[in-house]
Amino acid sequence: MLLFNKKIEFYQQRVNHHLSHFINDKLIPCHLLNDAMSYGALLGGKRIRPFLVYAVGEMLGSKLETLDPLAASVESIHAYSLIHDDLPAMDNDDLRRGQQTCHVKFNEEIAILAGDALQSLAFDILSTPIKGIALSTQLKMLNCLAKAAGDQGMCAGQSLDLLAENKQIELSDLENIHHLKTGALIQVSVQLGALSKDDLRTQDQQLLDIFAKNIGLAFQVQDDILNVISDTKTLGKPQGSDIALNKSTYPALLGMTQAKEKSKMLYQNALHALSQLPYNTDLLQQFSQYVVKRVF
């Protein structure tokens, strides 16, 4: 895992630098708003989605300078979603990444606006000309990110998740929720990296989609498991919150043993897709292992 550890740290530093630039290095009408945006976007985080943009793009031969805005745009969407997730009207959490959530640190009104602004910023970044990306490809990237973030992706999944609280749902319904709520942004991260190569074969794109779909769901299954077996200090957010909100989870529906088996099966599916690609997939294989073995 040495390669993975070095690369994820490198990518974290790189996307943080560019996010800070996009948020702060401009004329700022309201400093409080930008402070809240910086707080929500730059206060730690694993940077899984930017990692996938960079890892897939570099695997395919794209330059880091081309991938920087793609990584920053998808992380900006993710940051906005976390700020809004933590709000009193949603999960009502006061801890994120071991620190106060944005609405606790500032106030609820500014947190809502900071999330809104980060969502807009993502499309500002992605719609600005990018060296090495054709305008037609850039338009496709914008469309992919919009679908993944909105009513066909993350927001739809969050809505279904809220509607499922205090209800017993089927496993297929839970998988649909998580493919949308968590998986959509993970899948679009892989898509953005893949789109940076303008002559990628259709079959290779399809294999990357299979990889992304399986590893995205595996990420959520592991999240559900950790919410039960880990602790607040390790997670950096409230442990047991799923139980407190009476949410359907993989451990709740399958039991812990079967939930862990589900994670392993998804991991193997992801590896099988990677094994068929004519590229060096070592880094993505290590990432897949990290997803199912992580402790926070």
Image: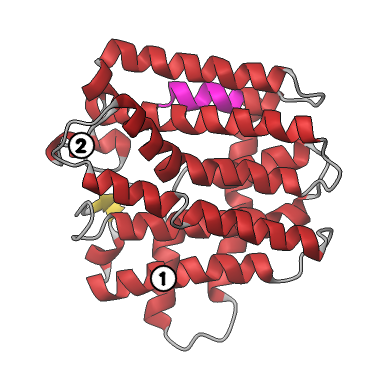
Which quarter of the rendered picture does the N terminus lie within?
A: top right
Q: Is residue 62 above or below residue 85?
A: above
In the image, residue 23 lies in the stretch drawn in magenta: no
Q: Is residue 152 left or right of residue 26?
A: left
Q: Is residue 114 above or below residue 224?
A: below
Residue name at image x 33 percent, y 17 percent? 259
Residue 247 - label: 2
Q: Main secondary structure of the magenta part?
A: helix
Q: Is residue 31 left or right of residue 137?
A: left
Residue 44 seen anywhere in this rendered image of the structure: no
Q: What stretch of residues is rendered in magenta?
A: 286-295
Q: Amino acid at mark 1?
A: Asp
Residue 232 seen anywhere in this rendered image of the structure: yes
Q: Look at the numbered disc 1 and give the secondary structure of its residue.
A: helix
Foreground mark, 1 or 2, reads: 2
Q: Amino acid at mark 2?
A: Lys
**How far apart are labels 1 and 2 at the CA level?**
26 Å
